[in-house]
Amino acid sequence: MKLSIHSLSKKYSGNLWGLLDFNLELKPGVLGLLGPNGAGKSTLMRILATVTRPSSGSIHWNDLDILSSPDPLRTVLGYLPQDFGVYPHLTAYEFLEYLAAVKGLDGSAARRRIEELLAVVNLSDARHRPLGGFSGGMRQRVGIAQALLNDPQLLIVDEPTAGLDPEERVRFRNLLSELSGERMVILSTHIVSDVEAVATDIAILSHGRLLSHASPEALLASVSGKVWEVLVPSADLPALQQGHLVSSVAHRSDGVHARVVADSAPLPNASPLDPSLEDAYLAAIAAGRATPAGAAA
Amino acid sequence: MSGASVVLAAARADFLERVRRYSFLFTLGLALYFGYMATVGRLTLRVGDSRGIYNSAWIGALLAVVGSTFISLAGFYFVKNTLQRDTETRVGEILAATPISRFAYILGKFASNFAVLASMIGVLALSSIVMQLVSGEDMHIHLWKLLSPFLLLSIPAMAVIAALALVFETIPFLRGGFGNVAYFFLWTAILIVPVVTNSSIYDLSGLFLLRQSIIASHAAPMAENSFSLSLDAGQFKAASTFRWEGIPWTGEILFSRLFLCVVALLLCVLAALLFDRFDPARGYRTLRAATIPLIPLPASTPEATPAVRTKLAPLDTLSLRFRFPAVLAAEVRLMVKGQRWWWYAIAAGLLLAQALIPKAEARGLVLAFAWIWPVLLWSSMGVREMRHQTYQVLFAVPHPMARQLPAVWLAGVLLAAVTGSGFAFRLLLEKNLPGLFAWAVGAFFIPTAALCLGVWSSSSKPFEVLYTLLWYIGPMHALPVFDFMGSAPATSATRYPLVYCALTAILFVMAVAGRKRQLLL
């Protein structure tokens, strides 16, 4: 199972580039897509889900060009878009039944699968309630269920945990970990802790370009020995933020404890810290910003 | 910020949002089109077989009543979406949390609606100058005579339409498709009222006032009912012309036009009182929630239930077997779900009436009603995926063109076939095969037109408006050329069923092309 993306670009009207010369090779596992707003994550996911066509470039699923023949990929695809909608007058069960039919699931198999998925997303008790009365989190769980209807080999989920409560988030992460064994999962999110929990690979995007594609360990290693804690008076914080990459701050009685990513100790009183994925992500984005990208999001 | 500034700021933002959309160009284009049609003599004001000489007074009056008549129909549908847009974009919720009063907000929206409609009238007014010069019958441009009808006939009418659109948007059951259909009938009623009451005070379009003015001037010999505003396929050749110097703007006339401005203001007040301020606990959202039967949650709600399982059994590859009937059944359910019991009761009553009424003409009329009744179900065809944001999921399934689109289309055809089956049953009994063919063409034509318009416009409004218009001038008046459903007994003997059959095929191809375009976006 292999997904290859070569020189992929997407140009929107007004000379805006959603993606620019994007390259990536994927194998089974969970790929966490990270990037600031407008980085091109959703554009990439829509293109991979065959919903949007790129301006140039190619995508191959197991050596098959999905731009010229998308249906083989669609057969094994599960997709949860960011702005997922439902039909308000259908019940959760009816809605999943409808999508199962469109995806080509056999009647009895579809019914079994729907029951199973409703249990997995914890909506069995609400299966006969119209979707119009569902909360945002419950709708999102219906979205997760529909993406898994056809037991996809490629699962693309865009901000899947948005609107979920902490318990459901953990539950979804566990489900993703369990699913990832023999399939490919692409997970886009702003929540670094979600990626940290499940991703076997992380891709960082900014301004439509790929800044980094590495394992979480490799990303952490890239900032190893570069994360510091410094104590500064509140009044000095703006100056510190001006000159350094500050990943977090905590106001305490003795002053501000700031977490700084820097090649060398930013202040004489700086003490080294173990790096987190968030530090690595911020460092990659800052490095990308320093390099002229030539593309706009 | 003062109240007036708030209103102006709301109006300005809304107006700018509108004029930066391509649809605004379409609106101006429509106004220009009316101007062009008048210039080439296809949109005429007739007095018997005569018309006025194309001087400033005649051209100004002609284009002004064209504006207040046709733009009061098309323009209404164009502006009736300002509150809806704020709901959809969620800007409304932000505005609701600001100190802006309901009246100031509605007044701002009214000003924006009015500005859009007035700009269409402005385009017509400018084109009237060109029209007079192009016609060349009277090269002397008298600005007051040319422009005063726009100012005093069209502009007050546009104020009423701008406010009426807001009232429709604030009344829950008029907000959607039903309101679109209902307005068409209201519009026809508005045009008739001054004739019935013989009073210019209710004369929104100004047509009645114009007629009275021409009679009073004795400029043209005028018989009863000889005065008409017509849109013709060919150029109108007047038997004679006469010189008319315009409407004398008497105090009485000015009062009647001022009265319309007061009506507009009162409608704004009504809209402000009805406006739910985007509160989900009021108005439309409450009504919608009431239509959805709420099943009480168990004591332990799904959110609170601890994790039960996260393991999924693998799906057998043999389970992936596409079944078109399953998709069709799902699409039919999707189409009819959510209707109240009385909707089905009326549809069933109309169906029985088609089968039981002995007189063919009356039966045809019942078929016409049976096929206007599901208009809001058909109008969601091709639109539903966009409206409910399910398109990304549906377009990412295998063979979306071959699987889902035909199912949507056939579901619409089935709906037509079932709701009109009483009529077909009688034709079968009578062995009236040409009639049955005309009926079948109608059963295919309606959903195909709905799908095509829905796919291309991503809105149910164009079908609702155009279909109602066609239904009104065709089947309701038993006019074979527009009788797309073969409801009039005479239609089946004409070539029109074949014409509509060909048109259906073209519309289907266009619908497929439209969906293909959506898939490639």
Image (tube, coloured by chain):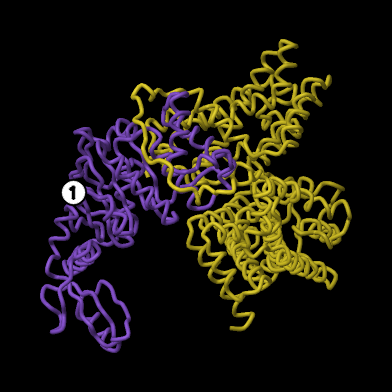
Does the image show residue B54? no
Direction from residue B190 to residue A67 in the image, left or right: left
Q: Disc 1 is attached to a residue of which chain?
A: A
Is B205 located above or below residue A242 in the figure? above
Task: Classify residue B197 by image quadrant.
Answer: bottom right
Q: Secondary structure at mark 1?
A: strand
Name the residue located 28 percent from the left edge and 73 percent from the top edge: A248
Q: Quadrant of the C terminus of chain B?
A: top left
Q: Colour of chain B?
A: yellow
Instruction: For the N terminus of chain B, give its image quadrant.
Output: bottom right
For badge 1, the amino acid type reads Asn
Q: Is residue A224 above or below residue B241?
A: below
Q: Which residue is mark 1?
A: A23
Q: Horizontal and vertical percent for residue B310?
A: 38, 41
Q: Residue furthest right?
A: B197
Q: How many marks?
A: 1
Could you tell me residue A99's position as x and y percent? 46, 34
Q: Which residue is painted at 62% across and 59% down in the image?
A: B280
Which chain has been coloured purple in this picture?
A
- Picture quadrant where residue B54 is located: bottom right
Residue B202 x, y percent position in the rendering: 82, 60
Is A213 in front, or is B163? A213
Image quadrant in which you'd find residue B354? top right
Where residue A173 appears, as percent x and y from the top left, is: 34, 49
Q: Residue at x 76, y 61 (%)?
A: B244
Mark 1 burial class by Cα count in 10 Å: few <14, some 14-19, many 20+? some
Query: Residue A224 versus residue B502: which sits nearer the camera?
Result: A224
Q: Nearer the viewer, residue B108 or A110?
A: A110
